[in-house]
């Protein structure tokens, strides 16, 4: 009995390996290996479960031998003979196949039932293992409203458990949710999905996914009528940083196609043509399956450009070229070429005054767009048909299609538009309003304006800044990882003996042999809430360089290196904990690192700032007040917080020989330093006479920082520094 059980177990596992291999290739969207194709038949006898064996037979019939009818028979058996040993993947795939089969046979209700049954097999933990399979279960029913809602509700359930997913699965989830929200005209949710996608892909260093999601955000902006914003968002993508040439080429093509579409809408035809011509240099890098799509789209867009410029002969040439390479498949790599073709053809025929042909083309485009829920093309087609009937003088059909436009808009903008206003908005927008109620017309114009304003505000003051913020964060992190930021060190010198008592670390950005100063880069860091992360990087770099700097000529024992941090960062507990931990783990002596605090950003809690400054001092940091005297509030800050070092702004040393007030400030600082044992650093000292005034003070802790001794230098330059004897 035991021997029989062992044999059964071995056979069962051997058979299951076939299904595991099928699942692996399917989820990775790869072809079955040649080894599998050659050997799977010899292993079929090891599968004891009928439904599992039928699944392997059905899958191989379909994907190796293209025998659809035989496959259909096998997949039906999988579902009819299922038991507790049936592979979950086998069931999911079979439900997907049957859903597709029922849709083809017009049995929509049964197809949706198949998709629902497939989803209900899964637990929240399963999504990671079956993400591609699950999407393909829902794909057949997405042409129906009920199917789209089922898919969206199912994916929202998965999102409730996204903490169980790995990063790769989350990325896939956000992409699918974005697709579904676009298909159901929930554009705001689609925007949120793409923002989540950008954040996660940035964290994973998936630059291609970041840029594709960003372009998709631009497409969403275009669909909401924000064309200038859409162009800015899409143009923001720098695909040159993507190392994989095929991925880069694919994204450049996607980018230029969408930019060209926007420029046609804005009637910038020369620019649209430039974008389309840019595609040529990338075609050689794309897979052959996409090449016809790219060329068809290029020809379609060129035809539209010539149509708009009334060069109808040239337009006809390009649209005929597009027709010659169009196929009827529904795969969309960039934008829907078949729908776009019929729209472009209809536009040309309308200009050629062939209204019957144009009507036929736009109706075909409308049908294709409705099948795929392409909202942008639905609206284009409806408006074009409305114009055709208006040109013919057919007011009955014109009114019918005018109402369809309004009804479609009502679905898309259901949170903004009210049923009561539908007809009046339609009349006003299309220019055929009667004079029966001027008050209602005025109110409807106001409502329409409010809708536009709301959408504009949504993008310009909420979505667009968030996109820029996320992309800036990604850019700054890339610079940090890629060592694009560098530190310059400016010596702080005791003028009484010319010894170096410290340095200030100053960040620079080096790109393509150009150096960008802090005033050019700090603003981006601040807007993106990245100052804390950059400050931790600066501290790491200082700790790395400290030992080398200690060997430099004229540097005293116990010297310090300072770095700038704002009060807003000091308020942040996370930053404080990390600063302290990094110093503690460095092995460097206390009072070797100085935190220069600048009061140039808003902070909320004085008590929290005070407590955190005390924590830093206790951990061994020196604390300096930077730029005393620049703002009136700096004087008050001396009483609020404890400082070891006070830095006087260069304002007080500039033209000091001609200012009694500035000289008095220096004398007061000298007195404070001498009586309270405070270190004073005077910044911006550039002339010998300025240096002499500081050297002749009473205190031995009046120091100088400025170009008189040295400009800020990189570490290699610092090693050869010679302090001039004054």
Image (spheres, helix red, strand yellow):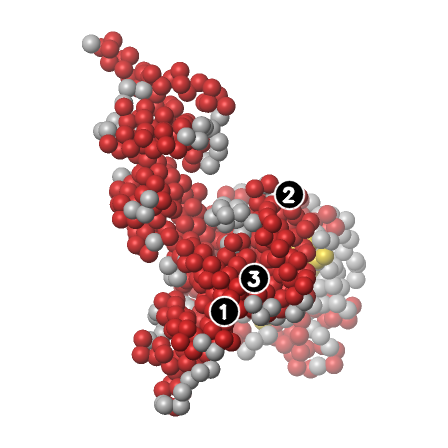
Viewer-nearest residue: 485 or 92:
92
Residue 308 appears anywhere in the view: yes
Locate residue 519: give its quadrant. bottom right
- Label number found at residue 344: 3
Mark 2 and mark 1 lie on one chain; the one further toward the N terminus is 2
Residue 305 on image: x %, y %: 63, 64
Mark 3 and mark 2 lie on one chain; the one further toward the N terminus is 2
Give the secondary structure at mark 1: helix
Measured in 3D between alpha carbons, the distance from the residue under mark 1 to the one under mark 3, in whole angstroms, is: 11 Å
Q: Residue furthest left?
A: 1
Locate residue 57: give its quadrant. top left
Residue in the picture at 32% in, 24% down: 53
Residue in the picture at 32% in, 39% down: 98
Which residue is label 2 attached to? Answer: 285
Which residue is label 1 attached to? Answer: 384
Q: Quadrant of the C terminus?
A: bottom right
């Amino acid at each position: 009995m035991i021997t029989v059980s062992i044999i059964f177990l071995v056979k069962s596992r051997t058979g299951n390996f076939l299904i595991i291999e099928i699942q692996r290739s399917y989820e990775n969207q790869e072809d079955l290996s040649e080894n599998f194709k050659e050997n799977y038949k010899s292993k079929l006898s090891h599968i004891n479960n009928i439904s599992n064996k039928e699944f392997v037979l059905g899958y191989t019939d379909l994907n190796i031998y293209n025998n659809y009818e035989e496959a259909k028979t096998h997949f039906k058996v999988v579902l009819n003979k299922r038991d507790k040993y049936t592979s979950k993947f086998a069931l999911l795939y079979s439900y997907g196949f049957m859903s597709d089969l029922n849709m083809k046979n017009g049995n929509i209700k049964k197809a949706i039932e198949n998709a629902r049954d497939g989803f209900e097999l899964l637990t929240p933990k399963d999504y990671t293992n079956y993400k591609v399979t699950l999407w393909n279960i829902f794909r057949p029913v997405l042409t129906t409203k009920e199917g789209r809602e089922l898919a969206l509700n199912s994916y929202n359930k998965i999102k409730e458990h996204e903490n169980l997913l790995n990063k790769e699965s989350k990325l896939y989830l956000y992409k699918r949710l974005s697709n579904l929200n676009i298909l159901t005209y929930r554009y705001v949710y689609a925007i949120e999905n793409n923002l989540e996608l950008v954040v996660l892909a940035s964290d994973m260093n998936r630059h291609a996914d970041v840029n594709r999601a960003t372009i998709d955000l631009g497409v969403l902006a275009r669909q909401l009528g924000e064309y200038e914003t859409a162009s800015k968002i899409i143009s923001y993508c720098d695909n040159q940083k993507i190392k994989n040439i095929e991925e880069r080429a694919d994204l450049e093509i996607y980018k230029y196609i969408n930019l060209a579409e926007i420029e046609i809408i804005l009637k910038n035809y020369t620019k649209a043509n430039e974008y389309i011509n840019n595609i040529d240099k990338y075609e050689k890098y794309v897979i052959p399956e996409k090449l016809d799509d790219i060329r068809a789209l290029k020809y379609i867009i060129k035809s539209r450009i010539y149509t708009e410029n009334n060069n109808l002969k040239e337009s006809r040439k390009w649209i005929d070229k597009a027709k010659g390479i169009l196929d009827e498949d529904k795969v969309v790599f960039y934008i829907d070429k078949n729908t776009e073709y019929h729209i472009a053809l209809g536009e040309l025929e309308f200009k050629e005054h062939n209204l019957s042909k144009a009507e036929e083309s736009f109706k075909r485009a409308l049908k294709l767009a409705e099948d795929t829920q392409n909202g942008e093309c639905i609206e284009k087609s409806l408006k074009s048909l409305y114009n055709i009937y208006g040109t013919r003088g057919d007011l009955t059909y014109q009114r019918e299609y005018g109402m369809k436009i309004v009804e479609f808009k009502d679905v898309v903008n259901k949170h903004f538009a009210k049923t009561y206003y539908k007809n009046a908005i339609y009349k006003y927008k299309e220019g055929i309003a009667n004079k029966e109620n001027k008050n209602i017309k005025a109110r409807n114009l106001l409502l329409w304006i409010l809708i536009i304003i709301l959408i504009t505000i949504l993008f310009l003051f909420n979505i667009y800044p968030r996109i820029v913020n996320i992309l800036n964060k990604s850019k700054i992190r890339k610079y940090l990882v890629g060592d694009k930021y560098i530190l310059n060190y400016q010596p702080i010198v005791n003028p009484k003996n010319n010894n170096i008592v410290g340095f200030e670390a100053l960040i620079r950005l080096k790109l393509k042999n150009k150096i960008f100063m802090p005033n050019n880069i700090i603003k981006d860091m601040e807007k993106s809430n990245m100052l804390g992360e950059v400050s931790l990087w600066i501290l790491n770099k200082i700790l790395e360089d400290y030992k080398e700097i200690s060997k430099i000529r004229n540097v005293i024992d116990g010297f310090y290196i300072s770095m700038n941090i704002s009060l807003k960062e000091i308020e942040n507990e996370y930053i404080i904990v990390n600063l302290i931990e990094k110093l503690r783990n460095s092995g460097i002596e206390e009072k070797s690192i100085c935190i220069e605090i600048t009061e140039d950003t808003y902070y909320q809690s004085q008590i929290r700032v005070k407590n955190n400054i005390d924590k830093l001092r206790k951990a061994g940091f020196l604390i300096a007040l930077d730029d005393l005297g620049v703002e009136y509030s700096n004087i008050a800050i001396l009483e609020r917080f404890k400082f070891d070092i006070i830095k006087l702004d260069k304002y007080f040393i500039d033209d000091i020989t001609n200012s009694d007030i500035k000289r008095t400030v220096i004398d007061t600082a000298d007195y404070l330093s001498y009586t309270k044992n405070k270190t004073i650093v005077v910044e911006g000292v550039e002339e010998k006479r300025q240096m002499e005034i500081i050297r002749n003070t009473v205190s031995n802790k009046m120091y100088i920082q400025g170009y008189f001794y040295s400009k800020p230098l990189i570490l290699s330059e610092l090693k050869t520094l010679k302090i001039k004897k004054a």
